[in-house]
Image: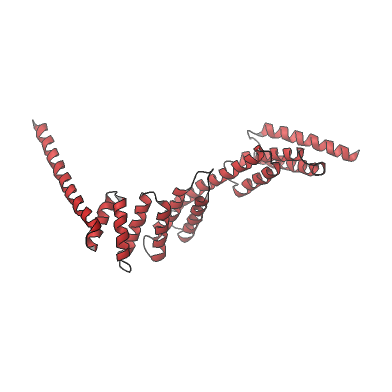
């Protein structure tokens, strides 16, 4: 019996709460199209705090146009930017976060918004096999953020995100290099693997890229005109030496040694022909 009474009270309280919320919602819905600035302000934050970012954005946009030069303008712009972000309109959000840093450079929200510009671009960044324009923008913006706020609590996160994006770029560069090798464009492959290694020296792809550089170089030498073979085999041997110095326990050692032996053998034939 006691349990039934408690349950009944809970139902009554919940019903009263829902009725109250429903009434409040109806009131604020009226303010969306008709209402004073103060009423629209209340409605905007009501919808924002309940996750209805579409209605909140509509109201904040209206309020932004009505409050230019007002002390509320910064708050409206800040929340409008987050409405766009929470709707996953990341490019648009980055624009409004940037507007806040430009219009209110002394704001206590400027540091947060400077980080969010880069973070929006990071969210918009495509997988490695697609265009990396937004990755480039995110990296650039995070570097700006680090330069402006070197003591920020967000520095560690910014650096971690930058590392993640550089690894994505390295992956794209590595796969492009492999594609040149796959289609037998050995000269382009040699150049591309060198670029990958130079631009992304700490990448997880560095070891395999350095091994495949040897492979591409030997195949380039094999398929070169006679006058260029000697120098290209010598280059391949240099690449091999650099590889085993850096990765003496590599999983690619055996295959690298086979390529070295092949280059050495073919180079020996050329030198023998020169001396005959």
Which is more toward the observer, 275 or 64? 64
Q: Residue at x 62, y 46 (%)?
A: 196
Residue 70 drawn at (x, y percent)? 30, 68
Q: Residue at x 16, y 50 (%)?
A: 23
Residue 205 is drawn in which quadrant?
Answer: top right
> Residue most toward the left?
1
Whether residue 152 can be seen here = no
Residue 135 drawn at (x, y percent)? 50, 50
Tell me if 141 is positioned left or right of 193 in this view.
left
Q: Residue at x 57, y 44 (%)?
A: 172
Tell me if 19 is positioned left or right of 68 in this view.
left
Residue 227 drawn at (x, y percent)? 82, 44
- Quadrant of the image containing the C terminus: top right
Tell me if 51 is positioned left or right of 203 in this view.
left
Tell me if 95 is positioned left or right of 238 in this view.
left
Compared with residue 222, is residue 87 higher up or lower down, i.e. above or below?
below
Q: Residue at x 63, y 40 (%)?
A: 179
Residue 216 drawn at (x, y percent)? 69, 39
Question: How many labels sit on residues?
Answer: 0
Compared with residue 164, is residue 96 higher up or lower down, i.e. above or below?
below
- Quadrant of the image containing the N terminus: top left
Whether residue 158 can be seen here = yes
Compared with residue 144, is residue 9 higher up or lower down, i.e. above or below?
above
Which is more toward the observer, 90 or 101? 90
């Amino acid at each position: 019996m006691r349990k039934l009474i408690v349950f009944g009270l809970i139902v009554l309280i919940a019903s009263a709460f829902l009725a109250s919320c429903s009434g409040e919602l109806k009131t604020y819905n009226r303010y969306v199209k008709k209402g004073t600035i103060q009423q629209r302000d209340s409605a905007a934050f009501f919808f924002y705090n309940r996750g209805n970012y579409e209605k909140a954005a509509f109201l904040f946009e209206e309020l932004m146009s009505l409050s230019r030069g007002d002390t509320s303008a910064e708050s409206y712009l800040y929340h409008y930017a987050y409405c766009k972000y929470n709707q996953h309109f990341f490019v648009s959000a980055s624009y409004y976060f940037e507007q806040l840093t430009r219009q209110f450079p002394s704001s206590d929200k400027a540091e947060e918004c400077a980080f969010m510009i880069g973070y929006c671009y990071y969210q918009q960044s495509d997988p490695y096999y697609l265009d990396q324009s937004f990755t480039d923008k995110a990296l650039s913006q995070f570097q700006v953020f680090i330069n402006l706020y070197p003591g920020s609590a967000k520095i560690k996160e910014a650096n971690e995100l930058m590392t993640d994006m550089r690894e994505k770029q390295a992956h794209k560069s590595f796969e492009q290099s492999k594609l040149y090798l796959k289609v037998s464009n050995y000269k382009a492959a040699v150049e591309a693997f060198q670029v990958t290694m130079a631009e992304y020296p700490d990448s997880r792809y560095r070891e395999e890229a350095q091994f495949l550089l040897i492979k591409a170089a030997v195949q380039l030498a094999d398929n070169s005109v006679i006058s260029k073979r000697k120098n290209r085999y010598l280059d391949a041997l240099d690449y091999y030496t650099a590889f085993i110095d850096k990765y003496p326990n590599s999983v690619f050692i055996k295959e690298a040694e086979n390529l070295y032996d092949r280059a050495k053998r073919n180079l020996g034939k050329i030198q023998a022909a020169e001396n005959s």
